[in-house]
Image (spheres, rainbow, N blue to C red):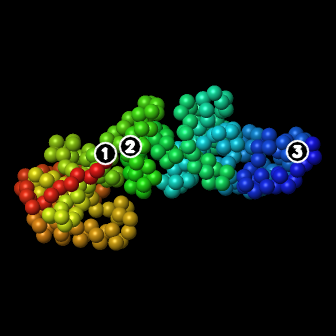
Amino acid sequence: MELDDRALGLLGVSQRGVLSRAQALQHGFTPNNVQHRLRPGGPWQRLLPGVYLTVTGQPTWEQQQIAALLHAGPGGLITGQAALLNYRLQHSEPRCVDVLVPLERQRASSGFARIYRTRRMPDSMVCDGAVRFVPPERAVADTARALADRAAVRAVVASAVQRGQCTIAQLAAELRDGPTHGSAHLRAVLAEVIAGIRSVPEGDLRRLIIRARLPEPLYNAQLYIGEMFLAQPDAWWPHHGVALEVDSREWHLSPADWEQTMTRHRRMCAVGIVVVHVTPRQIRDESARLEADLDASLKAGRPLPAITTRPLAA
């Protein structure tokens, strides 16, 4: 077979210079041609078994993803933290590219490509050029099952839901249909989200309240006076007239959001609400003092009939 330089060049462009051995042979390379290009100091380099980069230098993250998909074979889909990075729900490149393949495919993990055989290949996928990845709810669920730290699971789930990448119902369906192994943190965090928890500090706050046996508040409920919107505090005790705000620049998206927190404080205080402000560090490191302060505020509080409470919709 003659070498088809044009077709091979187009394939190389679409795959960012990454080729499989099968593709090279299909377009006219012989095994000796391939081996010659892979020689020490040659123009090609081996990324994974049977997968080559046709340029020198370090492969980019995109090239690594394409290589992992070629190694996995037809129909493979990137999942886990690598998929989250494509949805901009992950800030740094993970060490490995996790790829789902059908259960019947016999393909082993190698190098930076981790292969997961599954009976539940997604019905849909998202493509960015030659990179194919699972829907966001599957990426979140697969990532959560691999994380040992509940706070990290909270961060992933909260980020995905807040940014509108997936819904609570979609994550609940993934939890229901997926494996139970490794799902305990995801199950607990979804329960928190359904209760109104929207960030890692709010999750830590809920654990503190439960541990201290304080009355359970409504999380992120909307408060109104008549038809006028008043505020949406992080936690609200309607029978005590007490609101709590978790103040953290990390969890506010901009200086304008921070100023809105201060404006909410003034509005709530003006109608008689007792507003307690805490930071994530205080929730973690000063829990005993915070428990005592909250207990005192709740005991001193009183209902405010003029305020209408609308719980956060799940």
Q: Name the residue under label 1.
A: 194
Q: Which residue is drawn at 25% across and 47% down?
A: 206
Q: Residue at x 66, y 44 (%)?
A: 68
* Observer-nearest of 27 and 257: 27
* The N terminus: image quadrant: top right
| Mark 3 crowdedness (10 Å alpha carbons): few <14, some 14-19, many ≥20 | many
Distance CA(mark 3)–CA(mark 2): 50 Å
Q: Residue at x 22, y 67 (%)?
A: 264
Q: In this figure, what is the number of numbered marks?
A: 3
Identify which amino acid the numbered label 1 is placed on. Answer: Ile
Drawn side of residue 264 relative to residue 306, left or right: right
Q: Residue at x 32, y 62 (%)?
A: 248
Mark 3 lies on a secondary structure that is loop
Rendered view: 242 above or below 214: below
The image quarter containing residue 258 is bottom left
* Observer-nearest of 64 and 122: 122
Percent x, y of residue 51: 75, 43
Q: Name the residue under label 2.
A: 169
Mark 1 lies on a secondary structure that is helix
Q: Mark 3 points at which residue?
A: 29
Distance CA(mark 1)–CA(mark 3): 57 Å
Identify which amino acid the numbered label 3 is placed on. Answer: Phe
Distance CA(mark 2)–CA(mark 1): 10 Å
Mark 2 lies on a secondary structure that is helix
Rendered view: 153 above or below 258: above
